[in-house]
Amino acid sequence: MSPNAAGIVERTLVLLKPDAVARGLAGQILARFETVGLKIVALKMVMPTRDFVARHYPNTPEWIAGMGKKTLETYKDRGLDPIAEVGTTDPMKIGEMVKAWNIDYLSSGPVVAVIFEGLHAITTVRKLCGATMPFSADPGSIRGSYSSTSAVVGNATKRAVRNLVHASSTPEEVAHETAHWFGPEKPCVYRRADEDILA
Ligand code: GDP
Ligand code: MG
């Protein structure tokens, strides 16, 4: 049975965020994915508007509250008072604030959007990216290789954590995000020379 028939060839969306592009790391980061065997099937550079990046995120109440709760945890771990920091302990309000920081971040410069295809692409790409916070990401991962920033730094500067890359984390995110960034454009269909060896 081919890997494709077994349902393990997936597509996923990656964004090289404005800090990655501004630091001239686009080529190096794309190479990390390509070297593992992930195939570029769509790619573009865009200067997204605030409205466009706002619609990239799920924006469900659960997602907003989840972002708020994670940020509250960081304040707690550091012994910081959320009231003094951001004037509230409400996870929804804090989640909205982090969402606004993310909109500022993703619309602050050009972004490279890519659809990768390959074996277990969703999980493989997330593994290569590393943990959300570069400070906690494995040293060999993309986030761990190119930054050591953290939630503490992001929250103190009231900015989204600059962690170089975005990657879809579920099939639902892939569906929403590929449609959002590429619309009806069809990914390219071709074979890489090493596909039979990698499968
Ligand atoms: P990801 O899927 O690993 O990118 O992480 P999430 O979906 O949980 O968060 C989206 C983005 O929000 C992250 O990539 C960070 O840029 C930013 N972010 C997440 N959590 C925090 C936080 O606690 N504080 C700040 N300042 N930014 C955060
Ligand atoms: Mg995410």
Image (cartoon, helix red, strand yellow):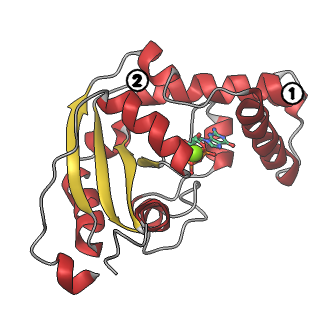
**Badge count:** 2
Circle 1: element type: helix
Split into quadrants, the picture shows ligand 2 in the one at top right
Q: Position of residue 38 (x, y in %)?
A: 28, 65
Q: Is residue 9 visible?
A: yes
Report the amino acid beneath label 2.
Ser
Residue sitting at x 52%, y 50%: 171
Label of residue 107 in the image: 2
Q: Is residue 162 visible?
A: no
Closer to us: 6 or 85: 6
Residue sitting at x 22%, y 44%: 187
Please identify, in this view, whether the residue under mark 2 or under mark 1 is nearer the observer.
2
Furthest-left residue in view? 193
Q: Position of residue 167 (x, y in %)?
A: 45, 50
Closer to us: 32 or 174: 174
Q: Is residue 47 above or below residue 121?
A: above
Mark 1 lies on residue: 84
Q: Position of residue 28 (x, y in %)?
A: 23, 60
Give the quadrant of residue 57. Answer: top right
The answer to whether residue 78 is left or right of residue 48 is right
Q: Residues within 10 Å of mark 2 (few under 14, many from 20)?
A: many
Residue sitting at x 37%, y 43%: 15
Circle 2: element type: loop
Q: Is mark 1 within 8 Å of ligand 1?
A: no
Furthest-bottom residue in view? 197
Report the amino acid beneath label 1.
Ala
Q: Is residue 96 above or below residue 76?
A: above
Q: Position of residue 27 (x, y in %)?
A: 19, 55
Rounded to the nearest angstrom, the CA distance separating label 2 from label 1 is: 28 Å
Label of residue 169 in the image: none
The answer to whether residue 85 is left or right of residue 160 is right
